[in-house]
Each structure stands twice: as structure tokens, then as C-alpha cells.
Amino acid sequence: MKTKILLAEDDPDFGMILKQYLELEDFEVSWFQNPEDVVELLSSDFPFQIAILDVMMPNIDGFSLAKMILKEKNNFPILFLTAKNQKIDRLTGLKIGADDYIAKPCDPEELVLRIKNILKRISPPITEIQIKIGQYLLDTQKLSLSHPDGNVRLTVREQELLLYLLKHNHSMITRDNILDNLWETNDYFTGRSLDVFISRLRKYFSNDPEVKIQSLRGIGFEVDFPTN
């Protein structure tokens, strides 16, 4: 069965190029030039596995559309297309809960690679369904982190990063290793996105002082997760 992609892109030329290329890569693409048409689908059956959203669209921008999708479809994979180079745009998308971004004009092969990496992360190879981390319980199937004071729903990328840190528990992890293994690229913007996700994890574990993710300036991180 083909992966169904929702593509929201108002530029007719660029949208057609992306649609045709993705279909050549054996994806099924539903292309929407008007983001309001996507909103109408949210109350019905939503048959897509991933959304690619242009940030700059009329009436409803990509960030606002992503918020609407994630409100109805929690943890839905989203990749942003942006023609801007300002870091605030990229960080805004990550804070909303997007999985990745790519700048326009983009290399179609790189876009396909990023899509496949996101889809691969949706069903990561996990040996344990529930993992005890201090006072918390991670349910890898439900993407939930529960604590006596409340539960948190994780995004796919947040859980992927948490599992990577757990794999290297009680040790030092370099930033380069994390970026190379999880983001498969290493530049300023991916480095900043890593900082965003680390900050989120620290916030999630703030009720247990025994759970520690310590920054090592210029090197990476040292993690201490009580798992017994």
C-alpha cells in the first residue's frame, strides 16, 4: 500500500513539480493549493500518513495549519517547507511539534530522504513497550510519559531522542553523534533544533530531580536516568 502524503503548497509550479516527483517515488500525493480545503478534511476521515506544509500560504499559514492538524490528529508527522532562512521560522515549527523542515527551493531527492526518515521513525524498532525512568513510565507504543502528577504525550522525534539518550545512559554523548544518528545532518539549524528537544525533555522530567540531562559546553550531554 502506498504512503499517502498531504501536500499543502499554494505555488502552482512548485506544487506540481513536487507532486509529480513524489509520485514517481511511489507515494500517493493529495495536493492542496488552498489550506482551507485541508481544514475541511480534519472533521472527516484523514487518510494521510504525513503532511508537507508550505509555511507561507494565503489565509492560513503553514504554522497555523499545523496547529489545527495536531489538535485533531495528535503526533501527526509534519514536514515544513520554508523559503525563509530566519532561524525563528524553523524553531517555531519545531516548537509546534513538527518533525522536520526543508528550505525552498529544495532538492527533491533530499525531500524524499527526509520523508522516508520520518516514516521510519513512526514505527521504530523497540524491544520494550514500557520503560521505568525514575518516577516516570515511558509507554513506547502510546508515545506517553506518565508521572503521578500527570501524563505527557510525546512526539515521534521526542521519543526517538529519549530512547537514544536511554541507550547511552550514565555516559557522555556528543552533539555530533546525536545529530548524525537522529537528524542525519549536522548544521547550525539542526543543532538549534536539538537544543529545543533537549529543553522539552528536561521540562517533562522536571518533577524528578534524579533524572538529569546535563549539558557539557562544546561537547554534548551527560545523562543519568534512574531505571531500576
Image (spheres, rainbow, N blue to C red):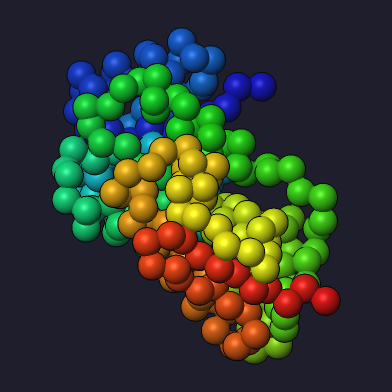
What's the residue at 77%, 73% (across, down)? 227
Q: Where is residue 64 in the image (x, y as percent from the top left)?
A: 30, 56
Q: Examine the rendered structure and indicate whether residue 174 appears above or below residue 27.
A: below
What's the residue at 60%, 22% (across, down)? 2
Q: Could you say which quadrant of the image residue 35 lies in?
A: top left
Quadrant in the picture for the N terminus: top right
Give left or right: position of 142 versus 104: right
Along the viewing direction, whichever of 214 and 42 lies nearer the viewer: 214
Say if residue 36 shows up in the picture: no
What is the count of numbered marks?
0
Task: List the single residue furthest toward the top.
Answer: 24
Q: Where is residue 209 in the image (x, y as percent from the top left)?
A: 60, 88
Q: Could you say which quadrant of the image residue 161 lies in?
A: bottom right
Along the viewing direction, whichever of 207 and 155 lies nearer the viewer: 207
Q: Position of residue 45 (x, y in %)?
A: 57, 43
Give left or right: position of 99 versus 150: left
Quadrant in the picture for the C terminus: bottom right
What's the residue at 31%, 22% (across, down)? 107
Q: Examine the rendered structure and indicate whether residue 134 appears above or below residue 168.
A: below
Q: Examine the rendered structure and indicate whether residue 190 appears above or below residue 154.
A: above
Give left or right: position of 202 versus 122: left
What's the residue at 38%, 67% (across, down)? 217
Along the viewing direction, whichever of 139 and 214 lies nearer the viewer: 214
